[in-house]
Amino acid sequence: MGSHSLPISTVRFLLRGVAHFARPVWETSPPERLASTAYRWFGTFIYRHYVRYQDRVQSHYTRFLRNQPQLNQLVSLVKEASPLTPISVASIGCSSGAELYSLLWALRSSIPSLIVTGVGVDISPEAIASAQAALYRASAPAVKMPHDESELADLSEDVIPRLFAPRGDEFIVHDWIRAGCKWVVGDICDSSAVANLGTHDVVLANNFLGPMDDAQAAACLTGIVGLVKPGGYLVVDGVDLNVKCKVIRRLNLKPITHDLDAIYSAGPHKGGWPWIRWGLEPINRSRRDWQIRYSTIFKVVPPGAGKQAIHSVDNKGRSLRDG
C-alpha cells in the first residue's frame, strides 16, 4: 500500500499560508494568552515544522558586551576556580573579535592578577583581519554585511573609554585587552583544524551553528566540546535547541543555571518567536530538559566523574539536583 503523506514542500507551503493568517492574531494577543498551553503548542508546531527551516544564512553580526549577564557569570566561575592559575579562552566563529575582546576585558578588569590568553577562530579571512586590527567605528561594522550594525552599538559613553582608545574616527581596543591574543583562519567543522587549536578553559561558540543543517551543527558542536579542558566551560547560544540538547545530554555536560533567565534573554534581536528563526522560544519549565535547553553555559565533566543523577550546577560549579 502506497504512502499518502504529503511532500514536505507541500506541507511547508500550507504552513506558510497558516502563518500568513495566524501571525497578525498572535502579534495582537495579550501576554497571558501567549503564555497559555494552546498558544505555546501552536508556536512550537509552527517553529518546528516551518520557521526553523528558513533563513539559514551566516552573518558576521556581533557587538561588544552583547550579553552582559553571561560575561558576569563567566567572571564569577573563573573567580571561584583559581584566579592565580593561568587560563586560556577561545572564541569560535569569532567574527570581528568583539566577543573575545569583551570577555578578556571583563576577566582582566575584575581579576587583575589573572593571566589569560585568547584565541579567535573564524572561517573568514576578512573577519580575522578585522579582529586582529581591533579597529571599530560607531557608524558601520568592521566586517561589512547587509543590514549589520556597528560592533559598538548600544555601548554607553562611560564604557567606551574603558574598552577603546580613539584613533581618528575609529576606536582601537586597548593594548592591555589585546595582549596575549592570536587569531586563526580556520573551519571549525574540519577535525584537523580542531586538533590544532589545543584545549581551553572557556570556549565561546555563539551564533554561528544555527544556520547549519542539524547534522552538521551536531557534528561541529561535538568537535567544539573537545576543545574544552575537563572542568572547563562551554558557552553556546544561537543554535537549534533540539540539536543542542541532544549533544549536551550525550556528552554529559552540566548546565550552569544561575541567572539562567537573564542570560538566555539578553542581547538584541531575539524577539519574534515563533515567526522568526532566531527568535527566543519562551522558557518552559514544565519540560524535563528545560535546564539544558535554556542554559548557555555548560561545565565539561572531568574524566572519571561518570554519569550522575545531577542535572545542573550553580554559579560556583557545585552540583544541584532538580527541584
Image (cartoon, grey):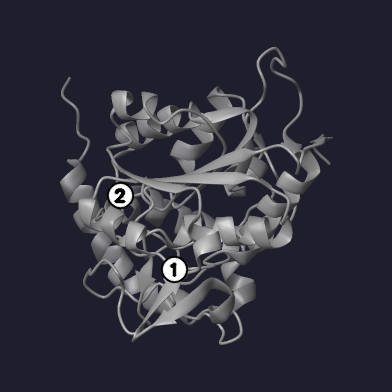
Q: Amino acid at mark 2?
A: Pro
Identify the image quadrant of the C terminus.
top right
The residue depicted at 48 percent of the width and 72 percent of the height is: 268
Q: Which residue is mark 1?
A: 63
In-front residue for pair 75/163 = 163
In-front residue for pair 40/268 = 268
Q: Secondary structure at mark 2?
A: loop
Q: How many marks?
A: 2
Could you tell which of marks 1 and 2 lies nearer the N-terminus?
Answer: 1
Residue 65 drawn above or below residue 77: below
The residue depicted at 23 percent of the width and 49 percent of the height is: 11
Q: Quadrant of residue 92?
A: top left
Q: Which residue is mark 2?
A: 211
The residue depicted at 39 percent of the width and 52 percent of the height is: 94
Q: Amino acid at mark 1?
A: Arg
Q: Is residue 158 left or right of residue 276?
A: right
In-front residue for pair 203/107 = 107
**Label 2 crowd bin: few (<14), some (14–19), many (20+), radius 10 Å:** many
Residue 4 rendering spot, x and y as whole percentages:
19, 33
The residue depicted at 66 percent of the width and 51 percent of the height is: 74
Q: Secondary structure at mark 1?
A: loop
Residue 75 rendering spot, x and y as whole percentages:
70, 53
